[in-house]
Amino acid sequence: MDQSSITWADGALVTIDQRALPHEVRELRITTVDEVIDAIKTLAVRGAPAIGVCGAFGVVIAARAATANGVLDTARVEAEAARIADARPTAVNLAWGVQRTLAELPGGVPALEAEALELLAEDGRVNLAAATTAADLIQRLCGDRPLRLLTHCNTGRLATTAWGTAIGALRVLHERGALAEVIVDETRPLLQGARLTAWEMAEAGIPHRLTIDSAAAWAMATEQVDAVVVGADRITADGAVANKIGTYMLAIAAAHHGIPFIVVAPESTRDISTARGSDIVVEQRAAAEVTGFGGVATAPEGTATFNPAFDVTPAELVTAVVTEFGVLEDAAAARTSAGTNTATASASTAGAEIAEIARGLYASGWMPGTAGNISVRQGDTAVITASGLSKGELTAADMVTVAVVDSKPVDASGRKPSAETTIHTAVYRTRGADAVVHVHPPHATAVAIKTAGSGVTTTRFTGYELIKGLGSARPDLIDIPVFPNHADVPQIGADIEKYLTEHPEAPPVLFIAGHGITTWGASLTQARDRAECLEAMCELTTLTGQREIAVGDHA
């Protein structure tokens, strides 16, 4: 992986001044909050992940400046953090990085600095994971041949901290020998494609051609593009993608020509608090960016301009969004193109699969009576078991389709969804899961009760071979969150959503004290298998009295 384009050294944030590229690789040292804000506003630092990390270190800089005689002025830090978060309102990563770091304020400057450094290290891991998955998807969609891809703006290590997102996928494909060339949009008006992406392509030795933005559709029409690969600054709950201006017209052109349109972005870019793309406030930038360039006027003096920094691409034009957690394919678009009958058939198929697995788990004693529930995601909706029905007698008809964004039913069956629907939708809004299983196996439920606290806690397991089946980042260790129970079940869902948003590294399994376990995965089978592995491991810990077993070093 490349050396990070952002470093923290002796109280200063050190990065590459992107305004000077491609002519000069100039170091930028940032030591004040005003310098942080100026760097973000003037695009000296740009790209959603990069400004998120920059914002995190901005909080550290604010805290260092607000410390006198060993006393930290927390109110001053919070005020400065708000100023930093407002520097670019459309890019959700900035506010995310600021808030995640600010949450460590009670621990003082050392805790803030440790969290910002973790964000920096995490970004490189996240980028490589998303880029690799995106490369796999592109090859699956386009075939095993040298590919011709088109990208917009800049999504490489300059826009992140290391490796890159969309450009990261191009780099993975290049290393596999699967990339013929990349067409690089110049990206008006500030030419991030011409100045930055072309520079990164040359740096990585990737064959590329630069084109004006308005030539991209013709490149698709003349069969010079196999897929479009872009990044994102924000992805709303309905799957709409806010990205650099010009992205929307690429998506329209790609849809017209039947070309895959892939978005590669970190999970932190998904803004589940914003329901629709139309709710996004799009930043308007200075007229001078349009009426001239490099200090030279190109339009009559006083010409009015329309200069949005971003546009918003609706979900139906997006083939797939790829994050570090996997592929979020646009099933909604597939259903629309296939018609209502296909949608109904799809829900029926999902219902049959859910019913079959539910009956099996009922026979195991994990879904006694009406307890427990299972769901399968279908784009912006989910099919889930109805409330008040015995899980041992479920059929495909005993399901409800709900909206992921608000957990409300969207079909006309008249049945009520399970009370725990908010738990399922919290997972879908924060993770790239396609199925969720919520069950009450006895040993796992007992472990959850014994390890529960007044708030969200975690319990660690080490050394068990079964950890490998739980989706942990490490094969020998897993920290599983334990959530407190609430009579108001939606509060459990809210707790889970908040935790998963703030902890992108959390495994796809969790405990709820006195309320069973929840697991998820890329398929219903995987979600069920994870529940079975967790229960088996908890049974072993019950028999042995040990959750942690010493293991040797891993190579």
Image (cartoon, rainbow, N blue to C red):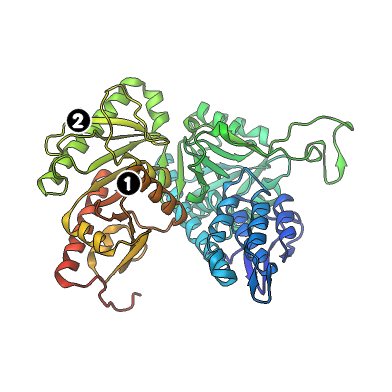
Q: Give the residue at x 61% y 56%.
A: 50
Asked which secondary structure carries label 1, the reply is loop
Q: Which residue is mark 2?
A: 396
Alpha-carbon span between mark 1 and mark 2 = 21 Å
Q: Nearer the viewer, residue 258 or 487?
A: 487
Q: Which of the two labelled residues, at mark 1 and mark 2, occupies the earlier sequence position?
A: 2
Q: Is residue 245 above or below residue 119?
A: above
Q: Residues within 10 Å of mark 1 (few under 14, many from 20)?
A: some
Measuring from the top left, give residue 94's x and y in whole percent.
60, 52
Mark 2: give few (<14), some (14-19) or many (20+) Cα within 10 Å: some
Q: Residue at x 56, y 51 (%)?
A: 167
Q: What amino acid does circle 2 point to?
A: Ala
Q: Position of residue 208 (x, y in %)?
A: 61, 48
Q: Element under label 2? A: loop
Q: Is residue 429 above or below residue 10?
A: above
The single residue placed furthest to the left in the displayed view is 363
Query: Left or right: where does residue 399 sit relative to residue 115?
Result: left
